[in-house]
Amino acid sequence: MAYTIDLDGKVALITGAAKGIGLATAKLLAQAGAQVVIDDIVHPDRMGSILTEFAALGKKPAYLQIDITKESHAKNLIDQAVGEFGKIDILVNNAGVVADWDVSYAVHVKGLFFCSKYAKEYMQKQKSGRIINITSTCVLTGGTGIPQYVATKAGAYSLTRFMAKEYAPLGIMVNGVMPAVIMSDMVMTRYASEQEMIDHYIPQMPIRRIGYPKDVANIVLFLSSDLSNFINGEIIVADGGRMYVG
């Protein structure tokens, strides 16, 4: 009998989910049956067509426009999600920016921790939960050329390990994903076209293709499911083999 990942009855909150990896993750978790809550700073008027797409995937997601960089706002985000759907089972800390030092730290480190801290309060009551943090392979390679991005994504990496140790006794599994060479707005700022970007990276990629947001979303789906019940504190590299064998 074929195995199907079924998240029916689960509530999943994804930050920074108006586009890219976050949006691909939201769609995939919705396809698996989860009730999805999308958080981003995009005005709700611009989210109409995106939310409509979900009608063909599963349950219509909720959209919350909340800036997670302040602790009170992050608490409000979690409280609103739980207030609407009664619980939170999965938190994907995906929000990311290319900005100055203060904003980068506020989003990648403080925002991630605040959201996790308040999600934990609800998850520990049900003695179960999954937190998945999106960091980056630049933590290990020093890549991107943006020091504040590298340094603060390292904070997300370290917090994943810290929270995995602290939260696991409460029934909450915490893991991370480290993408690289994923088609994104940030990567495309360095290239004139998608083809130029592909031509640059393909020779470095053992699998001879670049990554796309759904490649990361697939790993998040796995980490959200019962298939990963014995995985905690792991940070999975998703780079097509470029870093270690490329």
Image (tube, rainbow, N blue to C red):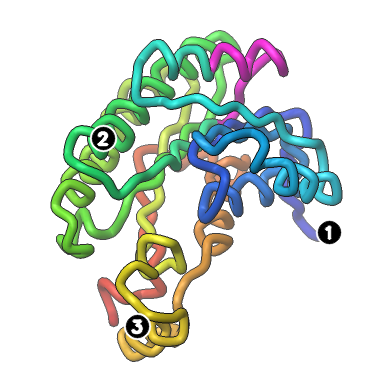
**Mark 3 — residue?**
201
Q: Amino acid at mark 1?
A: Met
Mark 1, Cα crowd under 10 Å, few <14 / some 14-19 / many 20+, is few
Q: Which mark is residue 103?
A: 2
| Front disc: 1 or 3 | 3
Image quarter where the C terminus lies is bottom left
Q: Position of residue 110 (x, y in %)?
A: 29, 26
Q: Which mark is residue 1?
A: 1
**Pick the front one: 59 or 72:** 72
Q: Which mark is residue 70?
A: none
Q: Position of residue 28 (x, y in %)?
A: 67, 51
- Give the magenta part as a residue range: 78-90
The quadrant holding residue 122 is top right
199 displayed left or right of 214? left
Q: Position of residue 60 (x, y in %)?
A: 79, 36
In this picture, is 209 found above or below 160? Answer: below
